[in-house]
Amino acid sequence: MRDPQIRWHIYADSVKLAEAVTRSTVEQSEHAIRERGAFLMVLAGGSTPAAIYSLLSRTDCNWEKWHIYFGDERCLPRGSADRNDSMARELWLDRVGIPADQIHPIPAELGAQAGAEAYAETLAGVGEFDLTLLGMGEDGHTASLFPGDPAGASPQAPDALAVSDAPKPPPQRISLSANRLARSGNVKVLVTGAGKKEAVMRLRAGDDIPIRAVCPPGGLDLLLDQAAAPTVPCEPG
Ligand code: 6PG
């Protein structure tokens, strides 16, 4: 497995990290819209990005040019509070003027296999993303790519994978493949809290955890708060 080039960024706390990611996301969107007339962003699930989505809801951006995709989704009914798209909508997407047909939820209510096939069709017409946000679990998973499962790192991998035995409930999920997640101008992995420190140490030690399968041409930006950062200094990013 190719190893991604990883740039380490450590912030004093999760608030500073969220503020920095919000600023850089706005800047990246302005650049993409100037250069290509659109900004394509993949959202992370879980709780870590919530502060970023909330800050973005209070920024003034050219929302009509934003296109939103999701890195993974839990196979729950549409509108379920535990879906990743529900959190993003509540905190951000329903509060700004991104056109509804430019927000592309994963149809996880169809079930893992049918939903993955449907989302792969949606993505077939989509080029490189401008920004992909990812989280990382305490076991080193990212999106819904879990240790020991196929990550879909090869160029031949489907864009969306059906997951049926996720250790993080619910077991049925849909995830973009590592290969598709990496087709992005910038991939940021957001990791906060002491509970993630062991996974970060495993990443730094070179362990084969799923984030290693995500190898964007420009490398990965790994953003940590102090609580998740290894206690010994990291190599300069
Ligand atoms: C999910 C997420 C998952 C998440 C990590 C980190 O569906 O749960 O996509 O990959 O990003 O588990 O979750 P937290 O941000 O809540 O720690």
Image: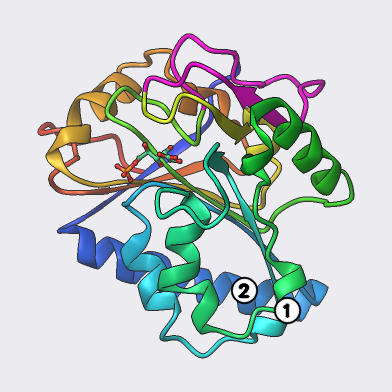
Residue drawn at the location 50% of the way across and 36% of the way down: 143
Residue placed most toward the observer, 136 or 37 = 136
Name the disc covering residue 29, or none: 2
Residue drawn at the location 52% of the way across and 41% of the way down: 76
Q: Residues within 10 Å of mark 1 (few under 14, many from 20)?
A: some
> Dots 2 and 1: beta carbons under 8 Å?
yes
> Does 200 sit above or below residue 84?
above
Find out if the beta carbon at label 2 lies less than 8 Å from the nearest ligand 1 atom.
no
Taking the magenta stretch, the answer to whether it contains residue 116 is no
What is the magenta range? 145-167
Name the disc covering residue 65, or none: 1
Q: Is residue 203 visible?
A: yes
Which image quadrant: the C terminus?
top left
Residue 29 position, x and y percent, is 62, 73
Quadrant housing residue 177: top right
> Does 2 sit above or below residue 108?
above
